[in-house]
Amino acid sequence: MKIQEDARYAKSDEWARAEGGVATVGVSDYAQQKLGDVVFVGEISVGATVKAGEILTSVESVKAASDIYSPVSGKVVAVNHEVIAKPELINADPYGAGWLAKIELSAPEELNTLMSAPDYAEYRKE
């Protein structure tokens, strides 16, 4: 399992990496491994307001459909249309090309409620 050192993690296996008040979010390597081959990513709307813990989108894999929750609150300012067109990017590069959305943080302090990379590694140790 790969872990991005500069990201923060939700217990539901999403990650957030903040820079200048905007967080890039996606699903962790652990989550993509559990999902299996991702074949569909639901639409995400630019301009939508999300709250931490609310459904951001859904993904479908050859195994199951899963809701993806926003790890942070704010306004969606960018969507990775490439991952919607090529869902397999989540499996190939969950922390890079497989990101899902960029969210302008309305409550930056929420990042402190997410797990650090070492804490997430411990949480997901099998």
Image (spheres, grey):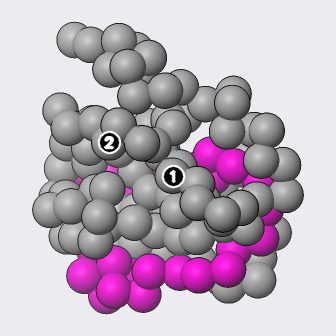
Q: Which kind of residue does numbered mark 2 sit on? A: Gln
Examine the rendered structure and indicate whether residue 123 appears above or below residue 103.
above
In the image, residue 51 above or below residue 124: below
Position above or below: 115 against 52: above
Q: Secondary structure at mark 2?
A: loop
Q: Determine which residue is flagged by label 1.
A: 17
Amino acid type at circle 1 is Arg
- For the point 38% across and 81% down, which residue is it? 84
Mark 1 touches mark 2? (CB < 8 Å)? yes
- For the C terminus, the image quarter is top left
Magenta stretch: give its range.
61-87
Residue 105 is situated, as x and y percent measured from the top left of the image, at 76, 59
Question: In the picture provided, is 43 more to the left or to the right than 45?
Answer: left
Q: Quadrant of residue 39?
A: bottom left
Q: Is residue 78 magenta?
A: yes
Question: Which corner quadrant of the image does residue 109 belong to?
Answer: top right
Q: Position of residue 9 (x, y in %)?
A: 50, 35
Q: Residue furthest right?
A: 106
Dot 1 falls on a residue whose secondary structure is: strand
Q: Residue at x 58, y 60 (%)?
A: 19
Q: Residues within 10 Å of mark 2 (few under 14, many from 20)?
A: some
Res 106 seen here:
yes
Q: Is residue 93 left or right of residue 65?
A: left
Residue 120 spot, x, y in % from top left:
41, 23
Q: Label 2, on which residue?
A: 4
Mark 1–mark 2 distance (CA, rounded to whole Å): 9 Å
Of callouts 1 and 2, which one flags the residue occurring earlier in the amino acid sequence?
2
| Residue 34 visible somewhere in the drawing | no
Image quarter of residue 10: top right
Task: Give the camera-side residue of 52 and 4.
Answer: 4
User: Height in image: 36 above or below 37?
Assistant: above
